[in-house]
Amino acid sequence: MKNFNISVLDLAPVKQGKTIHDTFQDSLSLANHTENLDYKRFWLAEHHNMESIASSATSVLIGFIANGTKKIRVGSGGIMLPNHSSLVIAEQFGTLESLFPGRIDLGLGRAPGTDGLTAQALGRNPAIINEQFPRQILELQKYFSKENSNALVRAIPGEGLDIPMYILGSSTDSAWLAAELGLPYAFAGHFAPEQMDMAFKIYREHFEPSKYLDKPFVLACVNGVSAETSEEAHFLSTTLFQAFINIIRNDRKPFPAPIEDMDAIWSAMEKSMVLQKLKFSFIGNQEEIAEQIKNFQEKYQVDELMINSHIYDHQKRLESYEIIRKAKDSLF
């Protein structure tokens, strides 16, 4: 089994009965905790118009987390690039890299990170997204290059800086793009498991070496909920299940506390849909988590596993990441 790094995806989840200020402090606490546990990187994801997620100003939050930590890499998982101009993102991440040298990652996605009406408010044009996204990536590479110093439009800060870029995907489309551009590829298995097998296959088989990367680099994001006992872990995971029911019902309210009986609140159809969407969710005690990670890695051979954890109680969330770290380490 191939060894791999382990990292964190944080959506800055807003919990019922808590404030957004509480959310940001919890994110920083989690970053400090996982840094001490030697997690590789801490990524934040751009979302909009959701009461349950507070990471809309992603670049600002990355700066907050990087400033409160010392060595863990901090970045975006991701910036939804068609929501922005390439120049602004180059300047923002050039600023971040200048403030925190060697610690900033730029993960890039094409989805809006929100609903259709909000996407319109963000100024997106869905008719040109598939053309716009690859073009914007090339623009970013140009703005970050030393060769752009004689251009009429320059990214200051940003020019000449080495800021690793990752292509994010939840379908096969971005797998083709990441392979063509020779960039690392991160797949959103934590909410879109259906096409992960095919996406990895496409990316690996069609990868073209580039000046950025000489061989494929695959990162998979999954859900992780662990506790001292299997029973407690499954109880804590009901917050994650409820969050996905709310997505199905188009209810964006803050994340709820765990409950004893999921069957009391979801229908058979909702249960089936949620469990399918959460196929790549590692839930259990340390031994169970280790076995689930082992089975996953034997099949997918990823270079990095990124853990997203929706646990209502902050202390339990910290403990979950510690148990998952121990589970991973027990395999090697």
Image (cartoon, rainbow, N blue to C red):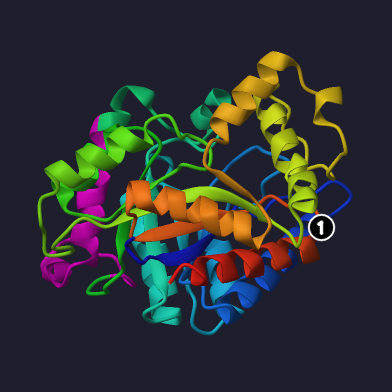
Quadrant in the picture for the C terminus? bottom left
**Rendered position, 129 above or below 316:** above
Magenta-drawn segment:
131-158
Task: Kindly identify the residue that appears in the image at 89 percent across and 50 percent down.
Answer: 17
Residue 25 percent across, percent down from the top left:
74, 68
Frontmost residue, 282 versus 196: 282
- The crowd level at tag 1 (other Cα within 10 Å; few <14, some 14-19, many 20+) is few
Kind of element beneath mark 1 = loop
**Rendered position, 268 above or below 122:** above
Residue carrying label 1: 313
Quadrant in the picture for the N terminus? bottom left
Residue 274 percent across, percent down from the top left:
63, 28
Task: Kindly identify the residue that appears in the image at 45 percent across and 43 percent down.
Answer: 188
**Rendered position, 201 above or below 325:** above
Q: Is residue 160 left or right of residue 150?
A: right
Frontmost residue, 42 versus 95: 42
Task: Kindly identify the residue that appears in the image at 21 percent across and 38 percent down.
Answer: 202
Residue 195 percent across, percent down from the top left:
37, 31
Q: Is most of the magenta stretch helix, strand or loop?
A: helix
Q: Is residue 139 magenta?
A: yes
Q: Is residue 266 magenta?
A: no
**Rendered position, 98 above or below 187:** below
Task: Kindly identify the residue that appears in the image at 54 percent across and 35 percent down.
Answer: 279
Residue 90 percent across, percent down from the top left:
34, 61
Hey, which quadrant is residue 66 in on the image? bottom right
